[in-house]
Image (tube, helix red, strand yellow):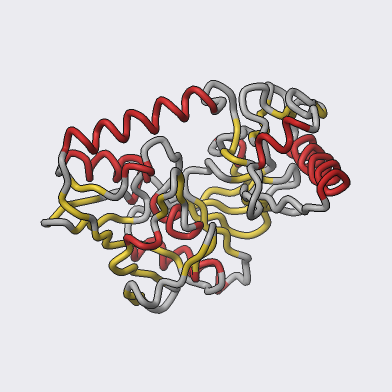
Amino acid sequence: MNLIKNFPMKQITSLGVGGPADYFCKPKNIPEIQQGLQYAQEHELPITIIGYGTNLLVTDKGIRGLVIQIADNFAQAGVEGTLITATSGCLFNSISRLAACHSLTGLEFAIGIPGSLGGAIYMNAGAYDGEIGPLIENITWATAEDVGIWDKNSYIYSYRYSRAQEEPVVIVKAHIRLEKGDQKTIYAKMKEFQTKRHARQPFDQPSAGSTFKRPEGYYVGPMIEKLNLKGYTIGGAQVSKKHAGFIINTGNATAQDILDLIAFIQKTVKEAHGIHLEPEIKIIGER
């Protein structure tokens, strides 16, 4: 396990902001993940697990303790019948493509969703009326001392929530159960979803995806747009002119700029609609 001190987190987050992590490692297998967890325990360090940094806002002061990145170093996947087996460092949209290649339907919604499979399971990621939760057959998790399994009945999930958010485990592998489908239909649906994403979302500018969770009965982007906040800017942070549900880094934003813009949007929406918008992006680091 290669441990790096004072690692600049903005190098690996899609927003391109954030201060350093005290310690950083990028394991390539389960034993190395456990080594990192054991090191943190022995030195009484807080532990932060991340994937590809696509849904993260790291504060300007950075992250205290050890950051373990589970990404391309730990990415293997295979297909047997209608079952996909994949490690948590696989790209979620790559698993969608793998499914399509084998004429398996159920993961079309994941095409274009950035980030790792582990992050998708942790957040119960979804789009276009699909989500990962119902497809899980079982999950392998690790702690410093143990490796265990949750079956599909033990993986508790709801909108943008999973059991993994409540328990001190690291998701390391998953079995995903799909169904056989018509490959042309699968690819057509994926193309449709990709076309919609690129038409509506600011893929050409740094962001962390949808900034806020969707409150029941509302769509966040139109709500913010109707309050004339499209293009609203604080420092280098801006409400996307393409989709008001996204905050982008125009080039020189700080994490604090983005936090201030999030707070301003929350305040404005609360005053207008009495609704508290909860961030969907994960905000981590010392405040």
Res. 223 image quadrant: top right
- Whole-percent x, y for residue 150 in the image: 36, 75
**Left or right placement of residue 261 versus residue 183 in this view:** right
Question: Which is more toward the observer, 251 or 139?
Answer: 139
Question: Which is more toward the observer, 268 or 67?
Answer: 268
How many callouts does the rendering have? 0
**Left or right placement of residue 80 versus residue 243 in this view:** left
Please give the name of the residue rendered at 62% of the width and 47% of the height, measured from the top-left corner.
281
Q: Residue furthest left?
A: 81
Please give the name of the residue rendered at 37% of the width and 45% of the height, measured from the top-left corner.
92
Question: Which is more toward the observer, 198 or 173?
Answer: 198
Please give the name of the residue rendered at 11% of the width and 56% of the height, measured from the top-left corner.
81
Question: Which is more toward the observer, 143 or 229?
Answer: 229
Res. 108 image quadrant: top left
- Evaluate whether residue 287 shows in this view: no
- Whole-percent x, y for residue 76 in the image: 25, 50
Q: Residue furthest front?
A: 217
- Whole-percent x, y for residue 31 in the image: 34, 65
Please give the name of the residue rendered at 12% of the width and 56% of the height, measured from the top-left corner.
80
Question: Compared with residue 98, is residue 177 higher up or lower down, i.e. above or below?
Answer: below
Name the image quarter holding the N terminus. bottom left
- Whole-percent x, y for residue 58 in the image: 66, 45
Question: Compared with residue 267, is residue 173 higher up or lower down, i.e. above or below?
Answer: below
- Evaluate whether residue 44 shows in this view: yes
